[in-house]
Amino acid sequence: MTKQTHTLAAEAVYIRGIRANLHQFIQQAIQVFFIGLVIGMERNVLPVLSQDFGVPKGSFLFLMSFVVSFGFVKGILNFIAGRLSERIGRKKVLLLGWVAAIPIPFMILYAPSWGWIVAANIFLGINQGFAWSMTVTSKVDITRADQRGFATGVNEFAGYAAVGIGGLVTGYLAVLYGPREALFGFGLSVIVTGLLTAFFFIKETLPWAKVESKEHSSGSYVGHKPRFPKGVSAHPGTWEIFTLVSFRHPTLNALCQAGVTNKIADALLWVLFPVFLHNQGLNIVQIGWITAIYGMVWGAAQLLTGALSDAIGRKKPIIGGLWLLGIGIAAVPLVHDMTAWAICAVIMGVGMALLYPNLIAALADISHPNWRSSALGTYRYWRDTGYAIGAIVLGLVAQWTSSIENAFWFTAIILGVSGVYLALRAEETHPRINPADLSPAQNVTSPTLDVRVISQTPPGGRCGLYTGYGQALAQHLGVRFQLDISTERDAHGHGFPSIWINGSPLRPSDGVIVMPEDIVGVLVANKIKVSNDLGLALIAEVNRMLHEGG
């Protein structure tokens, strides 16, 4: 029994779902909170005090240079992180991201010029590209498709709420202790804490992805079938996956361009929005409050907008978010007091919340688990390269026209165009709302299905598990279920514990215990469509056995 319990526990570890993996889900959210604090500490103090680091007033392109370095490096490292994590695992890449962040507070503290800040942001790009990417990928690994919007919403909520909090806290600390000292102390504390908690509390989630891949290949996957791109290798190479996501697949291409546009807007709000507010007479604490409102609304609203996309699909929230963000940005130059700018920050935060987690969820929906991390890495490459593109383009617009306001108008226009492009080119990706086409065989229900369980009395252990399987099959498929009591122990023969379908005993794939995928495999072989509810019911029986001590 010890061997059987061990085998069952090992299988159960890789069951997907937030409840089944709640502890690790929370730990991943804590990780991205720390990661968000690292980037948040730069979003208020550095742009406003850039002249203290030698940036001439009105030199907008020079000012934006630190975002250029961050965007290019983070974009490239996102892609590398995705590919690397499929080889060495998610946790090792996460830890590499934290190690890369260690020089950042020291470089800010001792920076003799703005060039050091630009260099520090190279390390920031490595940190964010490796660490943040892995929190997203890990959450997708351990959750079901119908929870993916909520899962990414929680992830981005934790991260971007931390971005807002980090900007606000460092604004106060800069007033009390000076900007360099504030960023040094805050940044080093967060980085060390994040590294230690990742090392001790984060689990490797790559095995979950491998189990899901096995289910898709064997036909035992339970739930609505995603619309994976056709004609893709089982394990595509770097160039194949990059071109597929970037250009060849219309929906993936549309999601990538929306990601680029999204980060162009965020580059504006990172650098030029605080400078604009400073030019309007607001002090660093007031600016910190407005940028914090933007970040915290963006973060908190994602708890709702991610779940919303699980209910109504991804496409509508993304398009609405692009357009709402554009409206908020266009309104900034039109108003002239702190309350009005705070309202603009709320509008922009809600717009970001509608589009941001759902772009990730949409891409994950239709990416096969064999190459999902690489697909997310490709998307995040393009999305975060938008920081660099936005920094260059918006810096040039503001500098050539000698007007920050024109950068706001320009950004609002491209957000509107991006929403139209996505509406015309992308299809809905949620597998429940727009599942893969089913072959005629998949829609045929077997006219007869008999399930028989041989059990001891009272049922317990595997006998109780198999009885639960039979009851779930009877409830969801209307099969004939028969429970026979026997005193003969002959597992998977004519005694107990055994489960039979249409007169044949089920043979466990691991040689020990019949698992849900074994049952699903038999049903698929009999041309019976397996619903997501049935799959969850079978898994629930395994969880109940473990809970009861099986």
Image: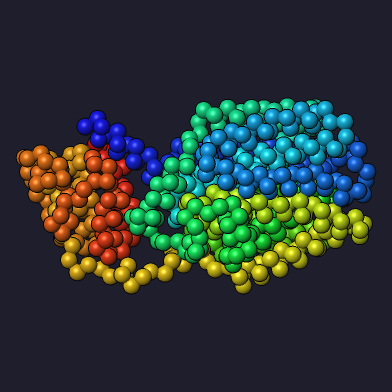
Is residue 173 depicted above or below 256 in this figure? above
Please say which color scheme the image uses: rainbow
Q: Position of residue 421 (x, y in %)?
A: 66, 69
Q: Nearer the viewer, residue 189 or 114?
A: 114
In the picture, measured across the screen, residue 11 lies left or right of residue 177, that is left
In the picture, measured across the screen, residue 28 lies left or right of residue 521, that is right
Q: Nearer the viewer, residue 287 or 513?
A: 513
Instruction: Mark yes or no: residue 315 visible.
Output: yes
Question: Which residue lies most toward the left here?
Answer: 487
Instruction: Mark yes or no: residue 159 visible.
Output: no
Give me the residue at 67% from left, 27% from top. 189
Is residue 543 depicted above or below 183 in this figure? below
Can you say which quadrant of the picture contains the N terminus? top left
Is residue 418 depicted above or below 3 in this figure? below
Give me the residue at 84% from left, 31% from top. 111
In the picture, measured across the screen, residue 543 lies left or right of residue 377, that is left
Q: Position of residue 234 (x, y in %)?
A: 47, 55
Q: Position of residue 333 (x, y in %)?
A: 83, 59
In the picture, measured across the screen, residue 425 lies left or right of residue 52, that is left
Give me the residue at 49% from left, 64% from top. 231
Q: Position of residue 330 (x, y in %)?
A: 77, 62
Query: What count of labels does the image hold?
Result: 0
Can you say which quadrant of the picture contains the C terminus? top left
Give me the residue at 47% from left, 52% from top. 369
